[in-house]
Amino acid sequence: MRLRKFFRLPFAERRLFVAAALALPLMRPGLHLLPFRAFRRLLLAAARRPLRAHGAGDHPAPERVLWAVEAAGRLVPWASTCLTRALTAELLLRRRGYPGRMRLGVARSAAGAFLAHAWVEGPGGISIDAPAPAIFVPLPALDGDGT
């Protein structure tokens, strides 16, 4: 059933889903092997290389980029955390020429435990993993690149 659904998607969305499914599991080892800032810098450098278009409609809308990351995250749950999804979404959005802004936020639970969350804000107010308003306090920008 899932495979049939996959093949009904337009080619550009199938390609996007595969890119998300391949990128998500690579994020975790990258985060374990490199310091966060170094790994993110590496991803942002990779995102600067634009994708070569293979035809009309090859760049799906930003909403579909976020859909692909969420859908792939359901298939590789062991590799999918809010941080890995945010990094993947930011990479895929930027590779396709869309602005993507990764955000990190912190909060305290009712019991006083420290909580952290990562999400991506895309163009037009779309987002992946955005927390409920006022739960997480966004941290200052990570780099001088405007994110």
Image (cartoon, helix red, strand yellow):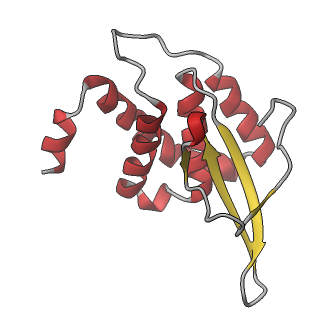
Please tell me how many numbered marks the rendered image carries: 0
Above/below status of 62 relative to 2: above
Quick check: 139 above or below 133? above
Q: Nearer the viewer, residue 121 or 17?
A: 121
Q: Residue at (63%, 43%) from the top-left corner?
A: 121
Task: Tell me where residue 40 sits by quadrant.
Answer: top right
In the image, residue 138 lies at what x, y percent?
Answer: 78, 56
Say which residue appears at 21% left-offset and 39% top-offset. Answer: 6
Q: Position of residue 103 (x, y in %)?
A: 71, 49
Q: Residue at x 55, y 41 (%)?
A: 88
Quarter occupied by residue 8 = top left
Among all residues in the image, which is located at the extreme bottom?
A: 111
Q: Residue drawn 54% across and 43% down?
A: 126
Q: Is residue 17 left or right of residue 138?
A: left
Q: Is residue 115 left or right of residue 79?
A: right
- Residue 52 on image: x %, y %: 46, 10
Q: Position of residue 67 (x, y in %)?
A: 41, 44
Front residue (pair 44, 107): 107
Viewer-proximal residue among 56 and 4: 56
